[in-house]
Image (cartoon, grey):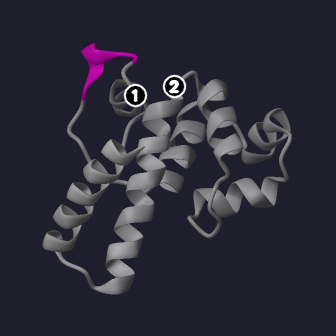
């Protein structure tokens, strides 16, 4: 996945869109860093987090906090809401995979989410 695609995906640069490839949240974060030609230690220092934690997030071995998502969105100047959607879609995908659920389960969950929003 190219940096230009990620920028387009997050609504910043529509003129350089490339073919979409699905990636995980961590892979997207790593791609952002690599395309910016920044070492992991530098990004971690700028975000004030341990480099090993950033590496684990990039390898999908650790889940980011909401604060991290906010920081990384600001750092790369991408929309926090779009980055959060990417993270949450990973969480849903992993949950469905772990439970061996099917698309009907996902559709039902979507209906329930819509229902629950009306209850707020």
Foreground residue among 56 and 42: 56
x, y percent for residue 1? 36, 43
x, y percent for residue 89? 38, 55
Foreground residue among 12 and 118: 118
Q: How many labels does the image show?
A: 2
For the C terminus, give its image quadrant: top left
In three-dimensional space, the C-alpha distance between marks 2 and 1, rounded to whole angstroms, equals 6 Å
The vertical placement of 65 against 14, above or below, is: below
Q: Judge left or right: residue 16 versus residue 29.
A: left
Please tell me the numbered disc located at residue 78. Answer: 2
Q: Judge left or right: residue 39 versus residue 3.
A: right
- SS for callout 2: loop
x, y percent for residue 31? 50, 43
Residue at the extreme left of the image, as rendered: 104
State the extent of the magenta-drawn residues as a range: 12-17
Please tell me the numbered disc located at residue 105. Answer: none
Seen at 20% across and 56% down, the residue is: 111
Residue 69 sits in which quadrant?
Answer: top right
Circle 1 residues within 10 Å: few <14, some 14–19, many ≥20: some
Precedes in sequence: disc 2 or disc 1:
1
* Disc 2 + disc 1, Cβ < 8 Å: yes
Residue under label 1: 10
The question of residue 52 being in magenta is answered with: no
- SS for callout 1: loop
Residue 3 sits in which quadrant?
Answer: top left
Residue 104 sits in which quadrant?
Answer: bottom left
Seen at 64% across and 54% down, the residue is: 64
The vertical placement of 63 against 47, above or below, is: below
């Amino acid at each position: 996945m190219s940096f230009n695609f990620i920028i387009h995906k997050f609504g910043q640069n529509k003129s350089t869109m490339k073919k979409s490839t699905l990636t995980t949240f961590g892979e997207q974060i790593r791609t952002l860093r690599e395309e910016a030609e920044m070492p992991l230690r530098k990004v971690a220092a700028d975000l004030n987090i341990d480099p090993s934690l950033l590496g684990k997030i990039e390898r999908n071995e650790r889940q980011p906090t909401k604060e991290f998502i906010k920081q990384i969105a600001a750092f790369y100047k991408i929309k926090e809401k779009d980055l959060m959607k990417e993270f949450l879609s990973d969480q849903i995908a992993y949950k469905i995979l772990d439970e061996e659920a099917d698309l009907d389960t996902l559709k039902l969950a979507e209906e329930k989410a819509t229902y629950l929003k009306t209850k707020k």
